[in-house]
Image: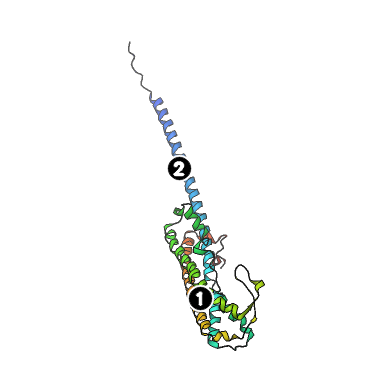
Amino acid sequence: MVKKPRLPSSSTFGRALSELVIIVAGVLIALAAQSWWENRRLEEDRDGTLTLLHDDLARLESSLRDTVTAVELEATIHRLLDDQPPENDPRLGRDVANALFEFGFEIGARDGQNLLPAYSDLKSSGRLGLLPDTVRSRMPAIELQLVILSRFLDDVVYFQQERVDPILFEHFRIDASSLDDRGGFSVEDPAADLHILRDRDVRNRLLLKSVLLRWQVGEWRETADSVRVVRDLIRGLRPDLCLGSIDRDCSR
């Protein structure tokens, strides 16, 4: 005898539907919570990255704008060339030695490496996507400017210094015990009167050095302006960066 199939009652169907709704709602809530947590971690990572990059840029800009010594050295060179100081004035010995030997600045690592460690870390780890497009698009140009400045130092400035050093060591008593790995030294009284300032070759090299100084300072300031633009972009996205930042502007 064939039995008639028994249809579920409305109460059974409703209970099953309720359970299904609860299960689906639970899954959706779990997915939403996971998405919220991942987005929160992403935002925290992005905020931390922007903070580190901003502080690197602030430190770099401060270094690039700290050109007082270079500017003073250029002024000293022009004074020595223009004033025709007495040949037997030993007080000018240090000024002449500095004019010949010093450049008054140091950019740091070569080829822009380690000047922006936070950005270098983002590139090496493939996380450049953490940066907003407005910031990320400007960073390669800053890197290129740093490379140009660094190579200029290596290829031109220090090459020029190698040609000047023999003049310095020929005409001045250098305290050999004071020489260090970075080239520092102390100068005693000139070994001869300061007639070297009348030497055409010396004057030409000092004049060329003055031109190099002026170009370098100008390029440094232009790079600092580029860095400042990116810093302003970051601070527009993160107004709270002044909390715990090394930025000098934040103390004003």
Q: Position of residue 24 (x, y in %)?
A: 42, 35
- Look at the numbered disc 2 and give the secondary structure of its residue: helix
Give the image location of residue 77, x and y in percent: 54, 81
Q: Position of residue 215 (x, y in %)?
A: 47, 75
Which residue corresponds to mark 2? Answer: 32
Q: Between residues 115 and 47, which one lies in front from this camera angle? A: 115
Q: Nearer the viewer, residue 130 or 236?
A: 130
- Packing grade of label 2 (10 A; few <14, some 14-19, many >=20) is few
Closest to the observer, 60 or 173: 173
Choose top left, top right, bottom left or bottom right for residue 83: bottom right
Image quadrant where one finds the N terminus: top left
Q: Looking at the image, tell me whether mark 2 or mark 1 is earlier in sequence order.
A: 2
Rendering coords of residue 63 (x, y %): 54, 68
Q: Amino acid at mark 1?
A: Leu
Quadrant for residue 59, please give it: bottom right
Task: Identify the amino acid type marked 2.
Answer: Ala
Look at the picture and state if 28 lies above or below 220. Answer: above
Determine the residue positioned at 42% across, 32% down: 20
Outermost residue, right direction? 177
Quarter that holds the C terminus: bottom right
- What residue is shown with label 1? 213
